[in-house]
Amino acid sequence: MAGGSDAVEATTLSCAKCGKPAHLQCPKCVELKLPREGAAFCTQDCFKASWSSHKSVHSKSISSSALVNPGEQNTASPNDGWLYCLRKGQSLSPKLPHFEWTGPLRPYPISHRRPIPAQIDKPDWALDGIPKIEPNSDLQHHVEIKAPDQIEKMRETCRIAREVLDAAARVIRPGITTDEIDAVVHEATISAGGYPSPLNYHFFPKSCCTSVNEVICHGIPDARKLEDGDIVNVDVTVYYKGVHGDLNETFFVGNVDEASQRLVQCTYECLETAIAVVKPGVRFREIGEIINRHASMSGLSVVKSYCGHGIGELFHCAPKNIPHYARNKAVGVMKAGQTFTIEPMINAGVWRDRMWPDGWTAVTADGKRSAQFEHTLLVTDTGVEVLTARLPTSPNVFPWLNP
Amino acid sequence: MTKSRRSPSQSTTSLKPEIPPVGVTVITGYLGAGKSTLVNYILSGQHGKRIAVILNEFGEEIGVERAMINEGEGGALVEEWVELANGCICCTVKHSLVQALEQLVQRKERLDHILLETTGLANPAPLASVLWLDDQLEAAVTLDSIITVVDAKNLRYQLKSHNDSSSFPEAYYQIAFADVVILNKVDLVSSDDSGASIEDLEKEIHNINSLTSIIRSVRCQVDLSNILNCRAYDATHATHLEALLEENKKLSTRDLHDSSVRTLCICEQKKVDLDKVRTWIEEILWDKKYGMDVYRCKGVLSVVNSDQLHTLQAVRELYEIVPTREWKDGENRINKIVFIGGSLKEEFLIDSLRACTL
């Protein structure tokens, strides 16, 4: 097996499984720069056979790499011990990673992991970052019709999620960092007795997503201060009484230019018009047609890589893909008792997205701005109930809602 | 296992529009039918094409998949690793397998085709669903075809061995979903055997799926042009239409017994209403109306108020109806739809399709 110029050298290593001479190396160990002893195998079969025990070497390495020499910090991070997120949250680095940034925004170091009180009911990924129940559940294959008691729980959890998002909305202002927003979300969630679902979901390091300007979604709260003129989306999901409630809104920071105001308002309207058609018998496919129509009318584009999803006792479940773009092959029609999200991401420029080195943050390919709004919905016998709807107490932050 | 040299995290999710997507062929079939032989034949052949083969042990929680690519000097084999993104289903439209394949295409200077070899996968339908992406996504890869390698010597036995009464042996699914069947090891079957002749085997295969093409082979030595760039899921591609429109070809297969997997072709001369057809096909595919189990569906539609011939294509619950080209002058504008599946009910299908005409 040729490998180009950097083939493994001649010093003989022993296969970690059987001890025979080994010439093949585990690619993950190579990537993590782990010692070659213990990472060498004689054949594919030995490698496969030892995989389940061998891979623990990778996760051990990842958690220990978080302790890095603080003296190497980049001048952009004044905070001691805060590091840049890499590999979806599985590793951290003191240095800003190299990347062809598409716009002006850059990642900043992130703070340490926030603790969760012991008595709070947690989903299984809280422990080790890997959801186990979710991917193997039958709820990935058919859309659940929720019983009245489940629906009642959804109402309660979604209401808490709404209140948590409102708490975040109230602190948005120039000068506050997205990390401070995350602290507000985290505290508000645990005060209500809930778990912030994003925390440690596939290693996501924070309790909510904060997506600024050209970030489409899944931005990681960090040390960057919001600036006058920014737009920022805060995406909150709360796990409470065994169910999840998911919503997000895009907010203005200080005085925002007209183009951004139109972008945000149009995105809000895309969600509104999509929700307006939800009722039993409507095809899931239709959502994308409506959103696309409304966005195109305003000369804006629709993000295609991320979609709405079923939600309930699982964070993400069937219907797994509810695309926001037109001419999609989404399967199924809506039925009373189903709960799912619609969460259009609308861009000022092109629809294409790129991913930052942290493995989470999705940005527009052309660096122009993106906005998003999301609700968790329940299909009723006659229409729809917006479980995460604004409350009379919700802060007045959207100018177009004022009569 | 060489180092997987991923370009620094610049993972774009789609290519610039000028580069056509790379075709992905799913290769399925029983162990021992010759899948590995086929793969090795393709990788070592002097055809000038750069082909990546992904050895995808589906269902194994390994996180990295092995890819072998014939690049380097004189087509030498290079082995690579394709890392799956840990199966995070966090509201992404593209399955992690698709993302991994796109990253592979991104990394390589030029890849002409990708083969996905599926060890131990009984039913290729879920894989097809993952790979049959919406055109709108402008993905860097596209599902080209499903190829089933069948062992001529053992086919009869494999078709007859029912593990239990309710499910069919794998062989039925693999043939039903195939766009191409490679009937391998024909040299081991002679016509004065007490068993089947080659012609009999081909008939059995066509009984299940009369749309698939069958290629006879010895040690899987097939002409690559017959199995690459089939574009079986490309609505605009003409060849499959021609087979359907061919007047005299009898596509319906004899009903062996009611529940068996077979092919059924229905026709309707009058133009159909597109909305009604959509509802009709959805009731069949999504609601399993009348207990029918449809695996694949291909059709040509003559639509009211349109000069465009529309094509219908379905794999399990995924379907699309797309205007494809203009009807030619003098062409017989007809609706012709082929169903491959179990418990198909001809009369119901004919009557309910007729109900879609105005």
Image: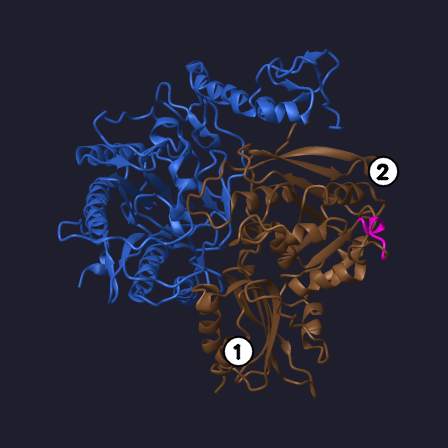
Let me know if residue A221 is in the magenta part: no
Q: Residue furthest front?
A: B194
Residue type (three-letter) at the residue carrying disc 2: Gly
Residue B190 shown in magenta: yes
Q: Residue under label 1, please give it.
A: B347
> Is A207 situated above or below B28?
above
**One can see residue A190 in this view:** yes
Question: What amino acid is at disc 1?
Answer: Glu
Q: Is residue B328 left or right of residue A96?
A: right
Q: Residue at x 25, y 36 (%)?
A: A185
Q: Which residue is mark 2?
A: B74
Q: Which chain is brown?
A: B
Q: Chain of mark 1?
A: B
Q: Is residue B212 above or below residue A31?
A: below
A85 over B94 or under it: above or below? above
Q: Position of residue B233 (x, y in %)?
A: 62, 61
What numbered label is drawn on residue B35? Answer: none
Same subunit: marks 1 and 2: yes
Q: Which chain is tinted blue?
A: A
Residue A173 in sight:
no
Q: Residue B92: percent from the left, percent from the top? A: 46, 47
Residue A159 coordinates in the image, percent (x, y): 19, 47
Please report the bounds of the magenta region as a residue range.
B185-191
Snapshot colouring: by chain
The spot of residue B38 in percent (x, y) is 76, 45
Task: Name the chain under label 2.
Answer: B
Residue that protrudes farthest toward the left in the picture? A392
